[in-house]
Image: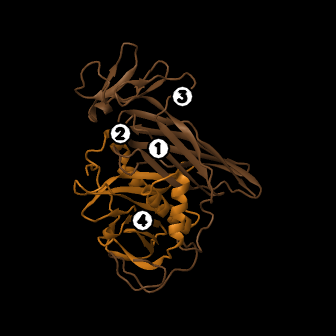
Amino acid sequence: MNSRNLDETARSRVSYERARAFGRPVLHSIHPAAILVGYSVHSVDEEVVMIETNELRASRAQDPLDAFTLRSWSRWSDSGTETRMHAMDDLMMRDQGSEAERATRANARLDDHAAIRSTLLIDGDPVDAEAVELDQRTYVSAILPDHTLVTIALPSDMIEAGFSTAIPGDSA
Amino acid sequence: MKFKTPVVANFAGLLVTASTLGGGGPAFGRQAHHGLVADSPATVTAPMTFGGFNPERAARYGYDVRTDEQGWQYAVPSGTPAGSAVGSSLKYNPATGQVMQPLSHGGFVKPMNTVPSNCGTSTLTLYTKTSGYTAYNLNGSAGAALYHTWRISMSARTGNQIVNRDGFPPFPGVSLSWGTNFSYNVHAVIPTTITGVVSTGVVETELGRCYAAGPRDTFRYE
């Protein structure tokens, strides 16, 4: 699956313009296996406060599908809460059981892991970040120089490639 | 690799230095965000109703939308012999909105007059005065999810807010489920009852469209 063969209904919602109109850096993995699916939003009373880049890892046929997300926030009440929620979304998506069971397990697992200070590469530049690794997934948050909060949940081995803020053209 | 203690490491390209995090808003570790999710959250679940086939879209996914003698529509894999319901989706009556669920041997479960048509469930759980979780879980009878329009209306005596989480499931065309934690702010002060409802919940699927009926949850801040 890639953005070329997404259903037209879905493709019409990819909305590169939405990402451009956000006016803040929107992250994309530059790992060679990363495939853009589209952009999801979090808006509050019609104001878009977060763009979520939805990406997949291109994989061999026998590999399970792997999805990951990168979020850019223009406005937030608590960076720790948004970072935690993003990590919980990823953990819960990958878990089985009832919503309550998955939420409780995700919380407990995140409680057991303290974040460490790290550096993220965005457009080739180092950015101070906080990170936690869990089951080959890494959860990262950073505040960019323009005060955009970015939170990332992705396979740990895809971080090394770094990230770009360039938004692909509509023909991508 | 665990990060319970400060370490010097260089994992997967993150240039890690030897200091744990402090300061405002930590996201991880036991000091952070207890109460973000309640110990025993009461998840509110509501059915999702099928809103009709999209024949063009179904064709792109290899399905023909057909109509039986009684006017019920159903989708079968392209090339299925006429009259066969093997491999069929649900059956939908566009006149009444009723749905028959398919059986494995090719028949259908007859609709009950008091049961709404159903292509899955949706949930809403308010955990705290500023956080909640919402999700949908399709049963597959209308195909996999492609994209969703998802708005949660939050209200309290102290304020209202509409949170929009339009977007994609993890694997469009494959996923049957999506869910997200979300933050909101109705400026709640003690005591306040906060009500949340999925006011718009529409999932575009391979074969058509599913609508969330609610769900609604309340959180008492006191």
Say whether marks 1 and 3 touch (CB < 8 Å): no
Distance between the Cα atoms at labels 2 and 1?
Answer: 20 Å
Residue where numbered disc 2 is placed: A9
Give B189 or B8, whichever is nearer the viewer.
B8
- Where does the image place residue B139, in percent across and percent down from the top left? 43, 38
Q: Colour of chain A?
A: orange
For the residues tagged 2 and 1, is the chain the same?
A: no
Distance between the Cα atoms at labels 4 and 1?
Answer: 24 Å
Give A150 or B129, whichever is nearer the viewer.
B129
Residue where numbered disc 3 is placed: B116
Amino acid at the residue labelled 3: Pro
Amino acid at the residue labelled 4: Ile
Say whether marks 4 and 1 touch (CB < 8 Å): no
- Where does the image place residue B13, in percent across and percent down from the top left? 32, 76
Q: Colour of chain B?
A: brown
Q: Residues within 10 Å of mark 3 (few under 14, many from 20)?
A: some
Q: Helix, strand or loop at disc 1?
A: strand
Does residue A42 lie above or below B115 as drawn? below
Q: Residues within 10 Å of mark 2 (few under 14, many from 20)?
A: some
Residue where numbered disc 4 is placed: A152
Residue occupying the point 58% across, 75% down: B24
Chain at tag 2:
A
